[in-house]
């Protein structure tokens, strides 16, 4: 936020005077609200590790996709609990004591100042990596503020098409923004590195959720990613978990159905032919009681 406490942290640059109590397009105001802090076993295997990832779910989101499967948290329906940066730092240390594989900050960008402050206080005391788990809709400036504090970036790369990004996330600039963001993330953390126990120590893991009716755009995302970053230097997680259960009255016809095997397999084939390393999600994950199941 600038001196007037107006916020320009994310690419919406809505300028909400959060310091004066205004709410931004992300749905959040002054207080850092956190919905849940707990060990979470359902991330990709090198992120979950043996005991689970130490997840911190922040309330609110600056992207707010129509198909969001975390909407109670991202749309501010969960009241959450207000944390100070000091309390968040303590919670991170506690997660490590509980055996967390890492500290996994889920959708933290609209609280980036407070998150950076918490990390500056405890980073030297943590012996586990810090994961920045984001929609990919990030400004380079905000990412630069986090340099040296984050070990693993785990962004989505959702769309290339401005039309799709406009329809589903009200963010027609998403593709160009995400390209610049993942390029900056890779500049900061470099090629991925595994620890001896198979967990991820450092690097960039890009997630892509294949949506029904969008396989051509999914392939475009993968091709663009392969043009801007080395496919053997990053990890790709190709996800199939989209479930339409919430969207029976959704105005977007494609989102009212499940992903087909043909759609997912054709995108997976493109990922393999481009030389990506990483994870593919079993299609059995696309059920209401979502239990991710990743295969290397
Ligand atoms: S983080 Fe929230 S308040 Fe800040 S610019 Fe983005 S949408 Fe606006």
Image (spheres, helix red, strand yellow):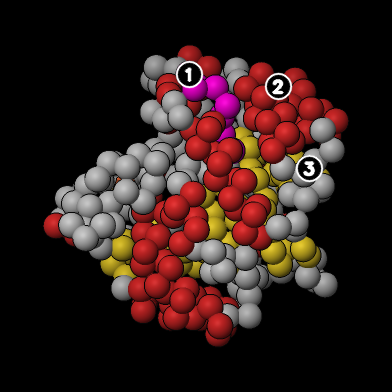
Mark 2–mark 3 Cα distance, whole angstroms, equals 22 Å
Point out the frontmost of discs 2 and 3: 3
Is residue 73 covered in magenta? Answer: no
Q: Secondary structure at mark 3?
A: loop
Q: Residues within 10 Å of mark 1 (few under 14, many from 20)?
A: some
Using a 10 Å C-alpha cutoff, classify the residue at mark 2 as few (fewer than 14 neighbours), some (14 to 19) or many (20 or more). Answer: some
Q: Is residue 78 above or below residue 266?
A: below
Q: Which mark is residue 20?
A: none
Circle 1 sits in a helix, a strand or a loop, which is it? Answer: helix
Q: Disc 2 vs disc 3: Cβ atoms closer than 8 Å?
A: no
Residue closest to the eye, 278 or 186 = 186
Quarter placement of the N terminus: bottom left
Q: Which residues are magenta?
A: 157-164
For marks 2 and 3, the one nearer the N-term is 3
Image coordinates of residue 191 in percent, x first then y, are 75, 56
- The percent position of residue 266, horizontal first and vertical second, equals 77, 23
Q: Can you identify the residue that label 2 sits on?
A: 263
Question: Which mark's residue is nearer the viewer, 2 or 1?
Answer: 1
Q: Which residue is mark 1?
A: 163
Q: Who's the residue at 56% across and 34% down the image?
A: 158
Real-space Cα distance between discs 3 and 1? Answer: 26 Å
Name the residue tied to disc 3.
Answer: 231
């Amino acid at each position: 936020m600038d001196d007037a406490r107006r916020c320009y942290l994310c690419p919406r640059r809505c300028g909400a005077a959060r310091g004066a109590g205004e709410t931004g397009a992300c749905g959040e105001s002054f207080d850092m609200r956190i919905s849940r802090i707990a060990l979470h076993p359902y991330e990709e295997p090198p992120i979950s590790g043996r005991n689970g990832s130490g997840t911190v779910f922040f309330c609110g989101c600056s992207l707010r996709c129509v198909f969001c499967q975390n909407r109670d948290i991202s749309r501010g329906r969960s009241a959450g609990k207000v944390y100070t940066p000091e309390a968040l730092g303590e919670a991170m240390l506690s997660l490590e004591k509980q055996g967390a594989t890492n500290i996994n900050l889920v959708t933290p960008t609209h609280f980036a100042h407070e998150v950076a402050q918490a990390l500056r206080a405890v980073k030297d005391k943590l012996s586990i990596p810090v994961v920045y788990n984001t929609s990919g809709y990030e400004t380079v400036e905000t990412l630069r503020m986090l340099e040296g504090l984050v070990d693993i970036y785990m962004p989505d790369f959702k769309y290339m098409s401005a039309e799709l990004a406009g329809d589903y996330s009200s963010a027609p600039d998403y593709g160009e923004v995400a390209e610049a963001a993942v390029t900056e993330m890779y500049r900061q953390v470099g090629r991925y590195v595994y620890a001896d126990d198979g967990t991820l120590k450092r690097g960039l893991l890009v997630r892509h959720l294949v949506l029904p009716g969008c396989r051509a755009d999914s392939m475009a995302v993968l091709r663009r990613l392969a043009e801007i970053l080395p496919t053997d230097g990053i990890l790709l997680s190709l996800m199939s978990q989209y479930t339409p259960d919430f969207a029976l009255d959704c105005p977007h016809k494609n989102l009212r159905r499940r992903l087909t095997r043909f759609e997912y397999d054709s995108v997976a084939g493109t990922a393999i032919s481009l030389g990506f390393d990483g994870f593919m999600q079993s299609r059995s994950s696309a059920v209401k009681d979502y239990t991710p199941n990743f295969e290397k």
